[in-house]
Image: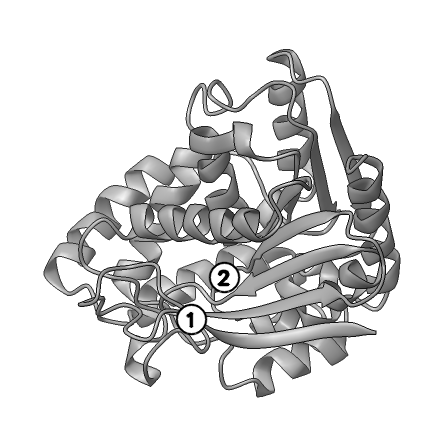
Amino acid sequence: MLNTSTGHIKVGSPQDAAAPYGLYTTYVTPSSKELKGSVLVLHGMQEHSGRYIQFAEYLAAVGFAVLLYDHIGHGNTAIDDTAQGYFQKERPQERLINDAIALHRHLKDKHPDHPHFIIGHSMGSFITRCVLQRVGNEFDGSVWIGTGAKTPGAEAFKVLLALLQKINPKKRSKLINGIFSKMNNTKFRHEPDFDDSSWLSLSKTNRERFKQDPLCGIPFTNNAFHTLLTLLLLATKKGWQNTIPKSLPILLISGQDDPIGDFAKGIKKTEKQLKENGFRDVSVITYPAKRHEILQEENNMEVFSAIAQWLLSHAR
């Protein structure tokens, strides 16, 4: 049996326009099994934490207290449709990082005598890496799902996005959204069942669920794309790993056909950077033919099990 509760947690100011009701959360805990530790899960762009309920329940069933939440501009944290895909005007990257730290400490206060882990997928993995740069000593391990290395040309593209963000931060540019989709779909565009979601998953069932979900796939604003690229650069800049504790166990897990990880090359580069800089416990798991959303692929139970076993081995 599991215990599940949902609700909003206030982490900003009383005049918080980005999340006036607070961050929407789902908290899943084992009801009888001995608690092994806590896990904070950060979702990716253009989706929401509800897609991680099955994963959270799997981890709770083996003994972890799991906290999911919707970032600002996403899911049930966004106050209405116009707020979807827009973060906030001032220093949105700082807000996303600080929200994660605040919820981690909320979870840590609930379970002060247990190990604490943070898991991030895609955009959530880059936020996670930024969190670890600041408070990595507060965690006992971290899992980066669908992450990657520095993207060539990222700084130049950021200059354009900075200009668009300044001129019209809430505009949903068809051009920028189209470039992002085209970049990620280049390898898959000749598939007979190709569509804009092809890069996300080999699973057609998952792609169809994504397209039918009203809280998924909402075009990003200029503000959101600029924020995303800022986070990616903070997480992958030269020396990005220097302030993360070298004793922190890290698991990199990805589909081999994930374009965000440059088809596993970015994962290998990240692993190499960590190991060359003295990180003592770095593990890598890649899944042949699988794409970006490995937690949603047809073999997701295999992925759940791999992550759960890694967490259990580091929760002792």
Secondary element under disc 2, as helix, strand or loop, is helix
Measure the C-alpha gap from mark 2 to mark 1: 23 Å
Question: Height in image: 302 above or below 242?
Answer: below
Pointer 2 residue: 182
119 horizontally vs 76: left or right: right
Pointer 1 residue: 74
Q: Earlier in the sequence, mark 2 or mark 1?
A: 1
Location of residue 151 in the rendering, given as x and y in whole percent from the top left corner? 47, 38
Residue 30 lies in quadrant: bottom right
* Along the line of sight, the residue nearer the viewer: 93 or 262: 93
- Please name the residue shown 66% across and 82% down the image: 209
- Please name the residue shown 71% across and 17% down the image: 280
Q: Quadrant of the C terminus?
A: top right
* Along the line of sight, the residue nearer the viewer: 9 or 42: 9
Label placed on residue 304: none
Question: Height in image: 97 above or below 53?
Answer: above
| Residue 151 in view, yes or no | no
Q: Amino acid at mark 1?
A: His
Residue 187 lies in quadrant: bottom right
Secondary element under disc 1, as helix, strand or loop, is loop
